[in-house]
Each structure stands twice: as structure tokens, then as C-alpha cells.
Image (tube, grey):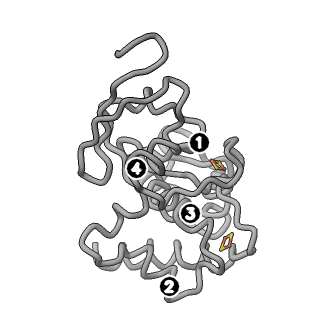
Amino acid sequence: MTDGTRSEILLRVNGLTHRLDVDNRRTLLDALREDTGRTGPKKGCDRGQCGACTVLLDDRRVVSCLTLAVAADGSDVTTVEGLAPDGELHPLQQAFVQLDGFQCGYCTPGQLCSAVAMLAEHAAGWPSAVTTDVSPERPAPELDAVEVRERLSGNLCRCGAYPSIVRAVLETAARAEVTG
Ligand code: FES
Ligand code: FES
């Protein structure tokens, strides 16, 4: 803590450690974009409504415009750049390219980070708001288009690429099942 209005924090962004001196009111989104140069996360609404700023914070998806940078002190942050650290596209990115999962691309970094976390949540057996059986002994919910739409409902796409985004996520999940 440097004084009452600023703090020194450590962020590991895509594996690189950054020591930052930030205003306590600075959002994680602004810290990522302006202080670490990670411009993958996009500022769409800046009020938690569009999902364009979604990143992974210790592997959980968050909207970085509603997360204070000081609250992320000591955490691992993964932005869309971190999904392809060596230039090899993540399977979801490959599916988005192959199946036209984007048009202008503005929402895409958030869609991808959200989808990575969503697939992990589903694999862990987490139910969604449209999962019919939420009893403790339930089988893992089947991942269909309705489930994907609900689980990604926090990520808006003004280009309306939703059908292709859902296809790309389902295709990625199916390929992961095949390859084990
Ligand atoms: S910019 Fe964060 S939710 Fe829209
Ligand atoms: S691809 Fe343009 S906003 Fe989604």
C-alpha cells in the first residue's frame, strides 16, 4: 500500500509478472489495457453488461470492467492473448475461425475467454439456469445448444454471430470428448 488512494499490486498476466502502482479505483480492465499493454480484453459497455472485457482470474471468468485491479492483487490473469501463448491457436479459436464464429471480432476475446471457462464449468458438472435436473446425484448435464446459449448469455454480440459461436463451442466440446 503506497498511500490511502493508491496501491502497489502484483498481477501475473499470461504468465508474466507485473508490479503496478494503481489508483484504488482502477478497474482490472484499465490496468490490463493501459498498464500491461494487453489490449485483447475490450471495453464495450464498461458496466458489466456486454462481456467484451471477460478474462480469466485464477481460471474463473470475470468481467474485468467490474473488477478492481486491487482485488486481483497476487492473482493469475489470462486474457485472450494467453490462450495462444506460442502462436498456436487454442482449439476454441480454431473452431471460431473454421466456423465463422465472429464478424467484426470486437466481442470475440470475451466470448473466447468466457467459453474456455464455461467448458471447464460444464466439465466439472456445474448446472446452469436451464439444467432441468439439479439434484445432487444428477448426471452431468448434456451440453447442447440451449445449455451453451444460457452459459454464454453474459457475452453479447452486436453482429449476431450467435449461431456460429454456439456451433464452434459445441464442436470444440465434441472434439475434446473424442480426443479424451
Ligand atoms: S465492458 Fe465489461 S461487461 Fe461490457
Ligand atoms: S463479432 Fe462483432 S460484436 Fe460479435
Q: Secondary structure at mark 2?
A: helix
Q: Which residue is mark 2?
A: 97
Q: Could you say where residue 149 lies in the image, as x and y percent from the top left?
A: 66, 63
Whichever of callouts 4 and 2 sits on the residue coming sooner in the sequence is: 2
Distance of mark 3 from mark 1, alpha carbons?
15 Å
Residue in the picture at 28% in, 41% down? 18
Whichever of callouts 3 and 1 sits on the residue coming sooner in the sequence is: 1
Whichever of callouts 4 and 3 sits on the residue coming sooner in the sequence is: 3
Distance of mark 4 from mark 3, alpha carbons?
20 Å
106 lies above or below 15: below
Tell me if label 4 and label 2 are in contact, CB under 8 Å: no
> Which image quadrant for residue 155?
bottom right
Amino acid on which disc 4 is placed? Ala
Q: Is mark 1 within 8 Å of ligand 1?
A: yes
Q: Which residue is mark 4?
A: 124
Tell me if label 2 and label 3 are in contact, CB under 8 Å: no
158 lies above or below 15: below
Whichever of callouts 1 and 2 sits on the residue coming sooner in the sequence is: 1
Distance of mark 1 from mark 2, alpha carbons?
27 Å
Query: Is 84 in front, or is 29?
Result: 29
Distance of mark 4 from mark 2, alpha carbons?
27 Å
Query: Is 55 in front, or is 120?
Result: 55
Residue 111 got which mark? 3
Amino acid on which disc 1 is placed? Cys
Whichever of callouts 1 and 4 sits on the residue coming sooner in the sequence is: 1
